[in-house]
Image (spheres, helix red, strand yellow):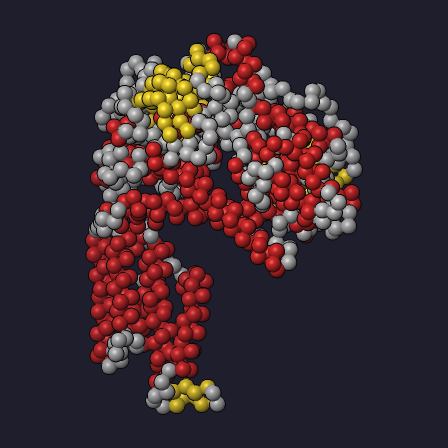
Amino acid sequence: MLFGRKPRSRPPAVAPAAVIPEAPGSRRRSRPAAVTAAGWGWQHGGRNAPAVCGLDLAVSPGERVLLLGASGAGKSTFLHALAGVLGPDTGGEEHGTLTLDGVHPADPAARGRTGLVLQDPDSQTVLSRVGDEVAFGAENLAVPAGEIWPRVRSALADVGLDVPLDRSTAMLSGGQKQRLALASVMAMEPGLLLLDEPTANLDPDGVGEIRDAVTRVLDRTGATLIVVEHRVEVWAGVVDRVVVLAAGGGVLADGSPEQVLGNPAHRRTLAASGVWLPGAAPEIPGGPWTPAAAGPRLLEARGLAVARSARGPAVLSGVDLTLDAGTAVGITGPNGAGKSTLALTLGGLLRPRAGTLTAAPALAGTARTEPGRWTSAQLVDRIGTVFQEPEHQFLTNTVRDELAFGPRRLGRDTDGQVLARVQHLAERLGLDGLLEANPFTLSGGEKRRLSVATMLATEPAILLLDEPTFGQDARTWAELVALLRGQLSEGSCVVSVTHDAEFIQALGSRNLQAAGGELGAVETLTPGLGDTAEAPTGRGRP
Amino acid sequence: MSAAAAGVPARPVGTFLARANPLSKLAAAVLLTLAVLVTVDWVSAAVVLTAELALLPLLHIRIGTLVRRIWPLLAAALIGAWGTALLAEKTGTVLLDAGPLLFTSGSVAAGIAIGLRGLAIALPGIYLLTTTDPTDLADALAQKLKLPHRFVLGALAAMRLVGLLVEEWRTIGLARHARGAGPDAGGAARLRGFAGQSLALLVQAIRRATRLATAMEARGFGAAERTWARTSTFSRIDAVVFGAGAAVSAAAVAAAVSAGTFNFILT
């Protein structure tokens, strides 16, 4: 029990901003913060248009606000400004006034008044041990050393992260890492909690963990909350106010969740902006769709065991799986179950640890029957693997070259066919206005579409996608579904590794679940997002 | 006991050396290295190396494990010894004369001295690395040596990123293979591919570093004053570690002088 958390009774929950409970054996928790923006705007250095402009907003202490708006409406910029990390030294230009309890957020007096949690769990972990990580913020605020460890323990208890203080931060799951990030800012006892899409990269269980942890810390501390998230349903029950930022600047809608989300005009605007609304599935371009009949056999796995490295342990074994043309397969399962490793092996990028993976003649053609032995050029002609991070796969300086790379690699650059194909693909994916742009400068949705398009350029028979819907808003999500439906209709096989049950359903996929080192078929799939917190892990397994 | 009562996580329980302050280990290692460096002779190197090997049980490292871990160093020491024995001044009696291979007692002694020295200098560093948590070293450097904490903690956070980048390099390699830019192209293309993969890694490294810097800044990092939740302390163990380092260093020099093999490096 050396590092165990001391059992202690939790103070009763209080209404926001009413009574501020005492932290055990330490000073008063700091009071909830107030925010005011008056004609506030921010223009990043080197950009032509402001990220935010003409924003007028007042948030009272203890309010819980969900901030919505289209991609590019400046939601993240606003949060970063409130967190005091948009200083003048970042080369930006500020207009109007923004205050946190009456001072500018970057003012030294505002240090530690805000706690910011970002989307990517890996990029916000500073230290290698859980306890040190939580203590880091309090140390920076020069909290007396004797007060820090009680704060660390109470913050970890609040977020429900019951692991030893010396546990390696790298060993935590995605949901645990985000709860660690939350505990790390709560140990600073901030008056304003800022969450920037904190659940975008998490599986459904992780989403529920974070939502519940945030609710607990707010009930206990009464801190003000501003959260940015595409998936409204996750936070609709937690917040008491919804603010919608207009794409052109200013506030589009402001009110209680019922007022804003119940207003048909607002709903239409929000849906068009890519916000996931409760009780409304995104409208998929192209209308109703029925999966085509299965075509010839492409790939067959028998007793397949997969491992991340040549000497590492097998993460999944005994996998029997067939992939046929025109069919979709969704592979689900908790983090670390070996889903991605399986996809990399099916994609011919990793050699099987044991068992066989055989390409049928319809796929292999003139190549060998083992995808793991194919050359790069043989691979792009047959199986396209779309990685989770699009930037990992960008090879050139323009969207046009990116799309033309695969066909050129296959020597198809003879009579202008490549350019015609590039043009056609770009038009179909809405990238035709960006052909000269650098791939790294695209928005998140555009990068995702481009990374899929680069794979489509060589018309592989099998398309493998690793978490294709992470961080996508409802609009880019629907576009991706429409695109993949088109591929299926044309006879491609689409395999996705995903936590997204709706995505699997939308593609009419066979669902397989990786868990406990094995891959099993799943009979029914539970749709919806709001029920994630209550649902036990491994739901829907036969 | 009192630390646990205050809610402070105890120092990691482990081997004797793991519980010592990184600075005392560092100081002992520096002393040992200096003692072996100032003289090129086999006696002082043998004394230091014997003392270091005697530490193995205290570290709970088996000799086989150590050999597996440092075999490149062993190989380097052997090659160094061989080369020196072959090329050093041929003094003393001739031990072997086979054409170009001429070994004398003097040259062999010099070779052994070079080999032993190499190992005696390398081992303290190995011990320091295997028994020291980077976080504890950073704490000690900032709190005891008063190095600027912004620099020390920045370096510590960067070190953690390096671990992530190793994994990222692999992922990028696979991702490029999937795009058709894999390793099966010819020599020049392979070189271009390596350059491209390096650039891709650099881009990711900068992105990650920028995001991490934002996260650190948002958590109040960068102010002039900060406190330390983990107090870096010295204890009796540190006196023992430093004392042992000093004693072995002195004994090595004394043994070399009394054996008449002391050979100051600058003469």
Q: Is residue A186 visible?
A: no
Counting from the top left corner in percent of width and height, residue B140 is at 26, 49
Q: In the rendered view, does B209 fall on the left or right side of B151?
A: right
- Which of the 4 image quadrants contains residue A398? top right
Counting from the top left corner in percent of width and height, residue A125 is at 40, 38
Q: In the rendered view, does A280 fall on the left or right side of B146?
A: right
Q: In the rendered view, does B105 fall on the left or right side of A524?
A: left
Counting from the top left corner in percent of width and height, residue B23 is at 26, 54
Q: Is residue B194 above or below residue A502?
A: below
- Figure label count: 0
Judging depth in this view, the residue of A175 and A503 nearest the camera is: A503
Residue at image position (77%, 50%) is A366
- Which of the 4 image quadrants contains residue A22? top left
Residue at image position (54%, 20%) is A273
Quadrant where the C terminus of chain B lies?
A: bottom left
Q: In the rendered view, does A444 fall on the left or right side of A240?
A: right
Residue at image position (37%, 21%) is A40
Judging depth in this view, the residue of A313 and B146 nearest the camera is: B146
Residue at image position (24%, 43%) is B231
Quadrant where the N terminus of chain B lies?
A: top left
